[in-house]
Each structure stands twice: as structure tokens, then as C-alpha cells.
Image: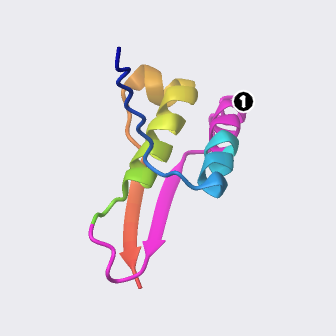
Amino acid sequence: MVSKRFFWASNFSIGVAIFSAVNRYLAKIMNQFPQYDVTMEEVHHVHKLDAPSGTAITLAEEIIDHLDRKRQMGERIAASCRRN
């Protein structure tokens, strides 16, 4: 019997995996500070084709999943993409 598996991640870098864990943790902490909001700025080289990147989208989704006021109100994360 052949087992078929599919593994998906927006980024396979160990650094991004660690950053992702910190991102989720900080979003939970921000629940205690409703006076602050979240924004994202992504900076890449000029040849990067996708904007925002899959990694940026995943990070924003993680914030929404762990920040109660964003999840409950169906809000989005204000984000900008820059190519240098």
C-alpha cells in the first residue's frame, strides 16, 4: 500500500517558524492592550513577484486568529509591501 502525504507551509525556514511562534504569542499578549493596533510592513527585493508574500499572509492570519478583537469583528490587518 502506498501512503500519500502532502505537506504545506508558506515558508520552510526555521527562522520564519520561530518568528511565527513569537508572532502568535505576541498577538495573545496584545489582547491585554486594546488601545494598540497591529500593522505589517513587508520589505523584499525588487524581483520578488508576489506581494504580499505567502509568509506575510500567513503571519497576518495568525495575528487575526490569536487577537480576539480582530477575530470577533472580522477585521483585517493593515499591511503594506515595499520592494527595494
Closer to us: 72 or 56: 56
11, 38: nearer the viewer = 11
Q: Residue furthest left?
A: 49
Task: Mark 1: give few (<14), some (14-19) or many (20+) Cα within 10 Å.
Answer: few
The quarter of the image holding the N terminus is: top left
Residue depicted at 45% across the width and 25% down the height? 71
Outermost residue on the top side: it is: 1
Q: Looking at the image, which is closer to me, 46 or 1? A: 1
| Magenta span contains residue 30 | yes
Where 3 sits versus 41, above or below? above
Check if residue 13 falls in the magenta segment: no
Residue at position x 40%, y 57% from top? 79
Would residue 22 appear left or right of 72 to someone viewing this image? Answer: right
Residue 52, by quadrant, is bottom left
Residue to which mark 1 is pinned: 32
- Residue 83 percent across, percent down from the top left: 37, 79
Say what secondary structure mark 1 lies in. loop
Amino acid found under the numbered disc labelled 1: Gln
Determine the image quadrant of residue 77.
top left
Give the residue displayed 50% in from the left and 28% down from the top.
Answer: 65
* Colour mode of the rendering: rainbow
**Against 5, is 26 above or below?**
below
What segment is highlighted magenta in the picture?
23-49
Percent across and percent down for residue 55 are: 45, 52
Q: Is residue 65 above or below residue 9?
A: above
Q: Quadrant of the C terminus?
A: bottom left
Where 46 falls versus 13 (above or below)? below
Point 34% across, 20% down: residue: 2
Q: Where in the figure is residue 74, as x and y percent of width and height?
A: 36, 27
Counting the numbered discs, the total is 1
